Image (cartoon, rainbow, N blue to C red):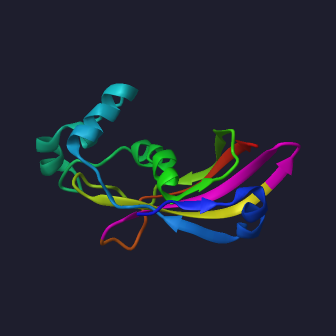
């Protein structure tokens, strides 16, 4: 995948309402799920106990935490695009997050990013992106989120 280079705030203005790009596919492993569980303290069996999940879960295997999927956003966003002239970029928050489909261990996900809003103030731009996390071979996405980023120029 080639990262799209956006030529500063001028080009950003022209992209509001448009799809910016799509990331590469990323496989979700049990090791990744376990590491996330250890980091967050969320060791629910549906995520961490493959034997029990295979017996009792409607998914017939472990699934990734929804917040694990969401947390892939910043890294996948860097695959999709970079803005020239940015001194600093920070996560500013989220407006809306939904997890309409579970991500089974071994599945591959990718993110589609659309710039839906931009507000400029002095030497900053606050951008709202719709991020859709697709699961390979599935119609329903794993996660749809409005992520807000603040860029300092």
Extreme residue in the right direction: 122
Is 43 situated above or below 111? above
Classify the position of the N terminus by image quarter.
bottom left
For the record, the magenta segment spans 119-136
Classify the position of the C terminus by image quarter.
top right
Percent from the top left, x then y, of residue 100? 45, 60
Residue drawn 66% across and 52% down?
Answer: 84
* In the image, residue 30 lies in the stretch drawn in magenta: no
Residue drawn 70% across and 48% down?
Answer: 85
Percent from the top left, x then y, of residue 119? 82, 53
Can residue 53 be seen in this snapshot?
Answer: yes
Percent from the top left, x then y, of residue 29? 23, 46
Residue drawn 75% across and 48% down?
Answer: 126
Can residue 43 be seen in this snapshot?
Answer: no
Query: What is the count of numbered marks?
Result: 0
Q: In this rendering, would 132 be left or right of 14? A: left
Percent from the top left, x then y, of residue 96? 62, 52
Q: Main secondary structure of the magenta part?
A: strand
Toward which corner of the image does residue 48 lie, by quadrant?
top left
Q: In this rendering, would 109 be left or right of 100? A: left
Is 47 situated above or below 57? above
Q: Nearer the viewer, residue 152 or 145?
A: 152
Q: Nearer the viewer, residue 142 or 114?
A: 114
Residue drawn 35% across and 31% down?
Answer: 42
* In the image, residue 125 lies in the stretch drawn in magenta: yes
């Amino acid at each position: 995948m080639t990262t799209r280079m956006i030529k500063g705030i001028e080009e950003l203005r022209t992209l509001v309402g448009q799809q910016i790009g799509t990331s590469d596919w990323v496989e979700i492993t049990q090791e990744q799920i376990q590491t996330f569980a250890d980091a967050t303290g969320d060791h629910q069996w549906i995520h961490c106990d493959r034997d029990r999940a295979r017996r009792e879960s409607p998914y017939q295997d472990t699934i990734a935490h929804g917040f694990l999927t969401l947390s892939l956003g910043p890294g996948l966003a860097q695959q999709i695009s970079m803005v020239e002239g940015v001194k600093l970029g920070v996560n500013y928050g989220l407006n809306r997050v939904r997890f309409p489909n579970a991500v089974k261990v071994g599945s591959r996900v990718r993110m589609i990013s659309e710039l839906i809003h931009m507000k400029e103030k002095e030497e900053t731009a606050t951008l709202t992106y719709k991020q859709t996390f697709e699961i390979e071979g599935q119609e329903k996405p794993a996660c749809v989120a409005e992520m807000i980023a603040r860029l300092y120029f």
